[in-house]
Image: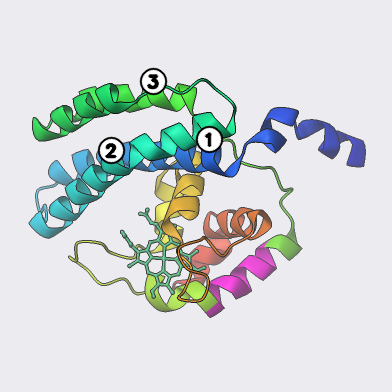
């Protein structure tokens, strides 16, 4: 059993550096935000404030992408490349609201900057500590989200159940900010994140919200 676990952690997974991971995660979140925007726009009761929040997030993500991608290249010892041109194109697509073109462009960048989720075996212990973590540090804001604000704190169980695991993992990397003490770094360990993902995607989390 132990041998099997060790052999499933490939060197590529172990080798993903912080910048590579950050770049991969930001690209996944950007694409996810565009998919959310398209879904929200199609709703009969669409909310202008929420739509504006999403477009602002997408624009902010595109503006930050150049530096993130270059840092990831540098970290992986790849030759320096400028991403200004594809990102200018990306901003144009956003201006023209050609969201599907933008999704395609992001998908091709994601191939260059994949996000790999470290593997932790699911266990009752991992979920239990995630549950406690959630109650202590996350539930206050996320379990009863304010509606109709530009940047809502979503119900994490609902969010985890409605998007792909990799997109949710990316959101856990990008979206969880530290407090004043830890600055802007994500305070959660890889094991915390894995446990929270198992927890949020589980029935226990759904029952907890009732
Ligand atoms: C002080 C309130 C607060 C606390 C505490 C908090 N969050 Fe959040 N969280 C937010 C808000 C508000 C957003 C939306 C921010 C934005 O869109 O820029 C957010 C965003 C997120 C996102 C990204 C969602 C997305 O759509 O991309 C994730 C994931 C997340 N939080 C998880 C957590 C977890 C896990 C914890 C506990 C360890 C936690 N948060 C604690 C308020 C909070």
Q: Is residue 79 shown above or below 39? A: above
Image location (x, y in percent) of residue 145: 31, 71
**What's drawn in magenta, residue-wise?**
127-136
Query: Residue 115: which disc?
Result: 1
Q: Sequence-wise, which precedes: disc 1 or disc 3? A: 3
Mark whose residue sits in front, 3 or 2: 3
In the rendered view, does 190 fall on the left or right side of 183?
Answer: right
Distance of label 1 from label 3 (alpha carbons) = 13 Å
Q: Which residue is painted at 17% across and 56% down in the image? A: 50
Mark whose residue sits in front, 1 or 2: 1
Q: Sequence-wise, which precedes: disc 3 or disc 2? A: 2
Report crowding for label 1: few under 14, some 14 to 19, many 20 or more residues within 10 A (C-alpha): many
Kindly identify which residue carries mark 2.
Answer: 35
Distance of label 1 from label 2 (alpha carbons) = 18 Å
Mark 2 and ligand 1: say if the CB distance to the nearest ligand atom is below 8 Å: no
Kindly identify which residue carries mark 3.
Answer: 108
Image location (x, y in percent) of residue 170: 47, 45
Q: Nearer the viewer, residue 201 or 49?
A: 49
Mark 3 and ligand 1: say if the CB distance to the nearest ligand atom is below 8 Å: no
């Amino acid at each position: 059993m132990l041998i099997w676990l060790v052999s499933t952690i490939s060197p590529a997974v172990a080798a993903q550096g912080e910048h590579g991971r950050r770049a991969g995660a930001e690209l996944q979140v950007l694409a996810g935000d565009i998919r959310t925007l398209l879904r929200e726009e199609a709703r009969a009761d669409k909310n202008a404030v929420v739509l504006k929040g999403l477009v602002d997030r997408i624009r902010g993500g595109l503006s930050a992408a150049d530096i993130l991608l270059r840092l990831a290249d540098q970290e992986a010892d790849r030759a320096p490349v400028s991403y200004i041109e594809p990102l200018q194109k990306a901003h144009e697509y956003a201006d023209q609201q050609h969201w599907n073109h933008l999704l395609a462009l992001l998908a091709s960048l994601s191939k260059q900057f994949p996000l790999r989720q470290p593997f932790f075996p699911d266990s009752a212990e991992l979920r239990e500590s995630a549950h406690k973590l959630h109650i202590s540090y996350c539930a206050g804001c996320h379990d009863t989200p304010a509606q109709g604000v530009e940047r809502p704190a979503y119900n994490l169980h609902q969010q985890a159940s409605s998007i792909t695991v990799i997109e949710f993992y990316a959101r856990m990397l990008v979206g969880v900010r530290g407090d004043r003490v830890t600055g802007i770094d994500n305070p959660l360990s890889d094991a915390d994140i894995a446990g929270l993902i198992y927890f949020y995607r589980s029935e226990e989390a759904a029952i907890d919200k009732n």
